[in-house]
Each structure stands twice: as C-alpha cells, then as structure tokens.
Image (cartoon, grey):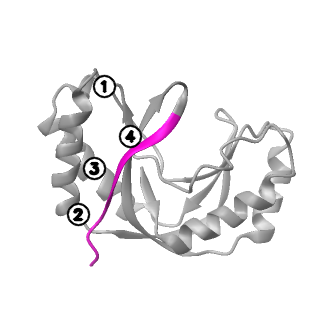
C-alpha cells in the first residue's frame, strides 16, 4: 500500500468521519487512506525475503504526487473512492515495484494480484441504493487536492484482520 503524507491522511480522515452516520453498513471508515498496489499470498517465512526486497526498493524510489479528481463508485465492490486526474506517477511506481518483486522473488508471480486502477478508498459496504447519498456527501466536502504519497506499507492478514507488518518512507525529491 502507498500512503499519503499527513495532510492527505488528515483530509481523508475528515471525509470518512462525516460518513460514519450515514449507514451502519459502511465499512473501512477507520482504515487510513491508502492506494492498494498489489496483493499476494505468501508461504510461511516468505515475508522475510519480501521485506528485504522492499527495503532495497524504497532506498531507490522517490515519493510522488497525485491530484484528486473526484468521487467514484465501484458497484461490484460496493466501494466509494476518490479518483485521480493523472494516475501516471502511481502507475510508474506500481510497475517498478511489481517488476522488481517479480524479478527478485519469482514465486510471487503465481500468487500476485495487481490493483487495476489508482484510487483512494473512502468507504466499503456502500450498496447501490446508498451510493448516491454517500457520493453527494463526499462531493459537499471534496475539493481537488494534490497529495504527496511518501510511505509504503506491507499489510498482512492475521486472524481475519489486516495489520501493517512494516512500513517505509520513500525518498524525498
């Protein structure tokens, strides 16, 4: 996952806080704002090599900026998100990271799923009938912002919950 700097995290947190009263079915409101890069299934102990590769990668990788464009909705995933006007910086980051991991850890190729579109999830559990209301609320609070994405994190599912195993700051400039 790639995370925005503190200003971006704060802005997304405010958006999410305003949505908490709309429906008890909304989920993901407590999760920090992030961009999903990819996911994979690991065998026991494989995370050690993955952490080493990520440490090498971040040492050579710069933080990047993305300009938010507005809210969108994935009906198949019941998710409201913020899209970006030009996702190129994220796409380049994602391609470099995935290429690096596939070359360094070939076993990941079989078990990797790549995020298909750069988006910042605002809420999950948004059924089609509630989507217009959630999007309206997001629009009342939304103003286009340029976010710096300066940190990546490795998430791991344990006991049915996601937790951050480790995170790294990207180079500035």
Task: Name the residue beneath numbered marker 3.
Answer: 95
From what the image shows, is residue 62 above or below residue 38? below
Residue 12 in percent (x, y) is at 63, 63
SS class of the residue under badge 3?
A: helix
Q: CA distance from mark 4 to mark 1?
A: 13 Å
Say which mark, if any, is on residue 126. Answer: none
Q: Nearer the viewer, residue 22 or 137?
A: 22
Mark 4 Cα shell of 10 Å, populated few (<14), some (14-19), many (≥20)? some
> Disc 2 and disc 3: Cα gap in Å?
12 Å
Query: Is label 1 or label 2 in front?
Result: 1
Task: Identify the disc placed on residue 42.
Answer: 1
The image position of residue 117, as x and y in percent, is 48, 48
Q: Main secondary structure of the magenta part?
A: strand
In the rendered picture of this protein, how many numbered marks are placed on residues? 4
* CB contact under 8 Å: marks 2 and 3: no
- From what the image shows, is residue 41 above or below residue 141? above
Mark 2 lies on a secondary structure that is loop
């Amino acid at each position: 996952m790639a995370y925005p700097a503190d200003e971006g995290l704060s802005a997304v947190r405010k958006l999410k806080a305003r949505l908490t009263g709309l429906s008890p079915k909304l989920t993901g409101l407590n999760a920090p704002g992030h961009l999903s890069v990819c996911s994979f299934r690991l065998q026991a102990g494989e995370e050690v090599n993955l952490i080493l590769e990520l440490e090498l990668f971040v040492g050579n990788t710069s933080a990047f900026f993305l300009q938010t464009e507005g809210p969108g909705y994935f009906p198949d995933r019941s998710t409201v998100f913020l899209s970006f006007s030009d996702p190129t910086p994220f796409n380049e980051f994602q391609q470099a990271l995935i290429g690096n991991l596939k070359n360094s850890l070939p076993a990941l190729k079989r078990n990797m799923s790549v995020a298909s579109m750069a988006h910042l999830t605002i809420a999950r559990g948004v059924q089609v009938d509630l989507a217009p209301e959630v999007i309206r609320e997001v629009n009342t609070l939304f103003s286009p912002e340029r976010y710096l994405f300066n940190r990546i994190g490795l998430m791991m599912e344990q006991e049915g919950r996601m937790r951050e195993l480790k995170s790294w700051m990207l180079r500035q400039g």
